[in-house]
Amino acid sequence: MFVKVKIFLNLLLLLFLGNVFISQAQTTRTSTTAGSLWFDAGAGWSAGVPDASDAVTFNNNAKATIQNAQSSTIASVTTGNGAVITINSGGSLTILGNMTTTNNTIINVAGTLTINGSLTVNNNLTWNITGTVIILGDVTLANNASLTVANTGSMDVGGDFVGGTNTNLVVDGSVNVDGTITVGNGSTATGTGTVSSSGCTDGTSSFCNQGPLPVELLSWSVKKSFDGVCELSWSTASQLNFSHFEVEHSANAQEWQILTSIQGEGTTNELKNYNYTHTMPLDGRNYYRLRMVDLDETFEYSEIITVQVIAKQAFTLSPNPAKGGLVRYALNFTPAPGDALVVYDLMGGQVTSVLVSSFTGEFSLPTSLSKGTYLVRYQGQSANHVLRLYVD
């Protein structure tokens, strides 16, 4: 609720100051290793203490501190190498636009830092957070960039978190991403804190299953049994605020269906092993992935694994016996356009039918259908199978 109210107020402020931003003045923080207070006008600001119309640049090794009960609003920030920004407890800094950092920038936040735009990190950025950081836009890390969130504070990102190759994320506090996390190959995530998002993609690295992310997945594999079923197994070294696994299956790695949901352990550092038997894999290539869901409903995906199965075409019905109402079906082959399931009574009279367009689906039995045995025929271009359906 706080973030939504903050967004609304900041949008009003942006509209109010819109004409000012068109002609932003450039306020530069001169280089100093000693550092000074943010509101000390004579301590290095090239054009006085910056205000909401100023795009602030910190020179190499420049430093400034916002003290307790002090508040500053500026247009944007760009930092030089080794720059240090400190916001003491009770203090606040609001950046109406974007923030860009370069090598070895350090930001200490015991109060509140709000960035209405986006954050771009070039090289290394260290946040020492015991307060709160709110970024309403995206966070973007260049190739080989490093972002460290130290101490016990929190960082809330309203947009996406995007990293290049060899992104290095260290989190000892908490990072909450409303959008998705996407990083390139060779990326790592470590630390004792937590990271949550609406989804995570990591190229060929194992970033999404490391350190502060909800589940540390040790293994994830599939193998065929002699009878044509697929045995899925996986194990975790730790789980943090974790809810459950969803085992997903696909014929093309594009369209996915949930096979089952398996409960997680909440929080644990113990080794946990899991397995699931897929009794109706497809005749052909099968793809599997895990959707790993945290207690706050954020989630991430495992890597996709695949197996080739040679199986006799078949379909199943459940429940069987049916109690009336809906009957579910599952195929182990790809249906063709116009394929259908047709229900007959034992005298050959048609009871109902349904077109089949996916591997799983359902159909309704007439409410007036009598108890007894019925025949369900799969009528297709390349398949023609019959099962008995018992109605109780």
Image (cartoon, rainbow, N blue to C red):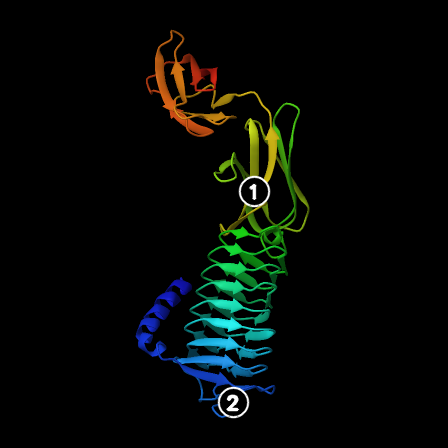
- What is the quadrant of residue 369 in the picture? top left
Residue 306 rendering spot, x and y as whole percentages: 60, 37
Q: Is mark 2 on a helix, strand or loop?
A: loop
The image quarter in which residue 60 lies:
bottom right
- Callout 1 amino acid: Leu
| Residue assigned mark 2 | 44
Point out residue 172 in the picture as x, y percentages from the top left corner: 61, 64
- 371 and 54: which is toward the camera: 54
Whether residue 111 is visible here, answered yes or no, is yes
Q: In which quarter of the image is the C terminus?
A: top left
- What residue is at 47 percent from the left and 90 percent from the top? 41
Q: In this view, does 186 lie above or below 95?
A: above
Quadrant housing residue 31 = bottom right
Residue 222 image point, x, y percent: 63, 35
Dot 1: element: strand
Q: Earlier in the sequence, mark 2 or mark 1?
A: 2
Quadrant that contains the N terminus: bottom left
Q: Which residue is drawn at 50% across and 69% down?
A: 132
Q: Identify which amino acid the numbered label 2 is placed on.
A: Gly
Q: Is residue 246 left or right of residue 98?
A: right
Which one is nearer the viewer's eye here, 226 or 283? 283
Q: Using a 10 Å C-alpha cutoff, classify the residue at mark 2 as few (fewer than 14 neighbours), some (14 to 19) or many (20 or more).
A: many
What number is the disc on residue 383?
none
Mark 2 → mark 1, Cα distance in angstroms: 54 Å
Q: Nearer the viewer, mark 2 or mark 1?
A: 2
Res 325 visible: no
Query: What's the residue at 51%, 68% (across, down)?
Result: 120
Residue 242 in percent (x, y) is at 56, 49
Residue at the spot of label 1: 290
**Mark 1 crowd level (few <14, some 14–19, many ≥20, 10 Å Cα):** many
